[in-house]
């Protein structure tokens, strides 16, 4: 079974609309961390947001928020007021408690249209 | 503020040659990671260092791959006897804590 599943290969969104990128994960470890990264066409992976499994509140970083639903094992990224510069690949990733490496999903290609 | 840097940014080599990549992490970061990303896929974990100790290696890291981090500062990733399947983007990342891992720009390897 895949550890990280991103079911949206591509999305088109109108500028200024809110965007939700889906991510579900699979782990039996009670301690884990969830990450979202943005990868523009230049190739660099840009850290966006982190959620720990024991965090009581959903993480927020500026226009980014993480909708963490532990029972459903989902960690969706919400981008408010989308901008043209948000067009990129977005990857969800997980670090399980006993490991140090991140496991990434296949990504979602987000295109913001004017 | 200097981020993670990698050198070279691009490398073209012929099959069978050896290549070495360098990663310079953010200076105070004691954790360093190597990942590989092929076209259309997310990055795949290769190996992890804490200071100079290599603490974790993926099964993806065949015996043709070796990584070092002497003195706990920069790191090198060497691929011996390159194969066409080694063509990928090799990403280095570093962190001080486990919850904010920053990536470098990557080294794109093309094996012809």
Image: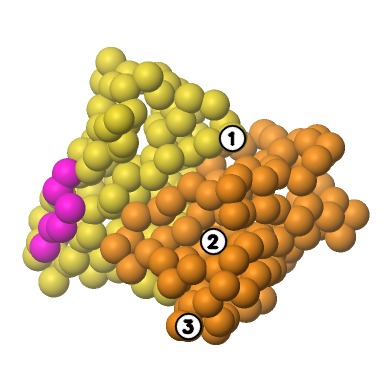
Chain colours: A orange, B yellow
Q: Main secondary structure of the magenta part?
A: strand
Which residue position holds label 1?
Answer: B99
Residue A40 in the figure: left or right of residue A70 = left
Bin the neighbour count of mark 3 within 10 Å (Cα to Cα): few under 14, some 14-19, many 20 and up.
Answer: few
Residue at left offset 17%, top offset 53%: B9
**Disc 3 marks which residue?**
A113
Q: Residue B94 in magenta?
A: no
Q: Nearer the viewer, residue A46 or B41?
A: A46
The numbered disc on residue B26 is none
Q: Are marks 2 and 3 in contact (CB under 8 Å)?
A: no
Magenta-tinted stretch: B7-12
Q: Give the SS element for disc 3.
A: strand
Identify residue for label 2.
Answer: A91
User: Residue A12's x, y, as percent?
Assistant: 55, 84
Q: Is residue A69 visible?
A: yes
The subunit letter for the residue under badge 2 reads: A
Tell whether B77 sits left or right of A6.
Answer: left
Quadrant for residue B13, please give it: bottom left
10 Å crowding of disc 2: few (<14), some (14-19), many (20+) = many
């Amino acid at each position: 079974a895949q550890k990280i599943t991103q079911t949206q290969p591509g999305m088109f969104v109108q500028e200024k609309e809110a965007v939700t990128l889906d991510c579900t994960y699979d782990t039996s470890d009670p301690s884990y961390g969830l990450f979202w990264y943005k990868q523009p066409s230049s190739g660099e992976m840009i850290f966006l947001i982190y959620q720990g499994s024991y965090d009581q509140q959903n993480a927020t970083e500026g226009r980014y928020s993480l909708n963490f639903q532990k029972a459903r094992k989902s960690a969706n990224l919400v981008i408010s007021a989308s901008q043209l510069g948000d067009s990129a690949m977005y990857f969800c990733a997980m670090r399980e408690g006993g490991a140090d490496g991140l496991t990434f999903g296949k990504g979602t290609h987000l295109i913001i249209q004017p | 503020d200097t981020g993670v840097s990698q050198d070279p940014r691009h490398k073209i080599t012929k099959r069978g040659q050896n290549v070495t990549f360098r990663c310079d992490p953010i200076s105070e970061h004691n954790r360093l990671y190597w990942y590989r990303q092929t076209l259309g896929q997310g990055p795949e974990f290769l190996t992890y260092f804490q200071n100079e100790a290599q603490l974790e290696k993926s099964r993806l890291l065949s015996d043709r791959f070796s990584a070092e981090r002497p003195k706990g500062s920069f790191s090198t990733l060497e691929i011996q006897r390159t194969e066409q399947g080694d063509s990928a983007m090799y990403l280095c990342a570093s962190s001080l804590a486990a919850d904010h891992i920053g990536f470098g720009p990557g080294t794109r390897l093309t094996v012809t």
